[in-house]
Image: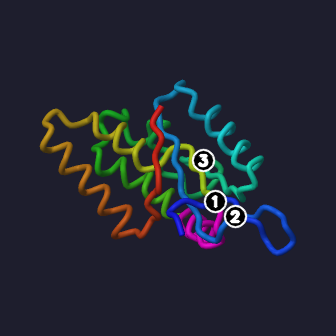
Amino acid sequence: MTDQPTPSTDAGGEEAAVRRGAFIVIEGTDGSGKGTQFELLAKRLEQEGYDVATFDFPQYDSESSYFVREYLNGKYGKADDVGPYTGSLFYALDRYQAAPKITQALAEGKVVLANRFTGSNMAHQGTKFTHPEERRGYFIWLDNLEFQMLGIPRPTKSIVL
């Protein structure tokens, strides 16, 4: 069996996804075409017979993004004035809320697509560090927070535009 889900033929001769999902994230700066590529990839995978679950982060319509919205709207001061660890917590908690849905979709053999994920947080908050060794320490901290402490699923692949 491979790491990636592949179409297979079920007992009725129909294409069906193998019961092992993949988690693919599209990352990139604003205006880089993430949304367009995200939609095109989802559509193509569905046309190829894959069962696809999609997620957009932050989840602006969810209560879990409350602190993200407040942060972006300046409630805590300018974005540059909020420390990278604090800002990262806001985004991590939003992803934490979605983690059970992502885990379930993967267990069902779906291809999970996310428009932005932890990599975007690392990129945005990482710019707040002037010394590479501090930035690296932050990256290690965030990786540990999200994937070990909070148990958020780690993407199988990240595509950076």
Task: In the rendered structure, find residue 6 and report the number of the disc placed on it.
Answer: 1
Magenta highlight on residue 37: no
Mark 2 or mark 1: whose residue is earlier in sequence: 1
Instruction: Estimate how packed mark 2 is, as few (under 14), some (14 to 19) or many (20 or more) residues with alpha carbons within 10 Å.
Output: many
Task: In the rendered structure, find residue 17 and report the number of the disc placed on it.
Answer: 2
User: Label 3 to label 1, Cα distance in Å?
Assistant: 24 Å
The structure residue drawn at horizontal position 78% and vertical position 61%, both measured from the top left corner, is 15
The structure residue drawn at horizontal position 42% and vertical position 50%, both measured from the top left corner, is 118
User: Which residue type carries mark 2?
Assistant: Ala
Q: Is residue 38 above or below residue 152?
A: above
Looking at the image, which is closer to me, 38 or 122? 38
Task: In the rendered structure, find residue 136 and report the number of the disc placed on it.
Answer: none
Instruction: Estimate how packed mark 1 is, as few (under 14), some (14 to 19) or many (20 or more) residues with alpha carbons within 10 Å.
Output: many
- Looking at the picture, the colour scheme in use is rainbow
Where disc 3 sits, the SS reads strand
Instruction: Estimate how packed mark 3 is, as few (under 14), some (14 to 19) or many (20 or more) residues with alpha carbons within 10 Å.
Output: some
The structure residue drawn at horizontal position 43% and vertical position 60%, both measured from the top left corner, is 154
User: Label 2 to label 1, Cα distance in Å?
Assistant: 6 Å
Question: The magenta stretch spans which residues?
Answer: 98-110
Image check: 13 left or right of 100? right
Looking at the image, which is closer to me, 74 or 131? 131
Task: In the rendered structure, find residue 56 and report the number of the disc placed on it.
Answer: 3
Mark 3 or mark 1: whose residue is earlier in sequence: 1
Image check: 52 left or right of 132? right
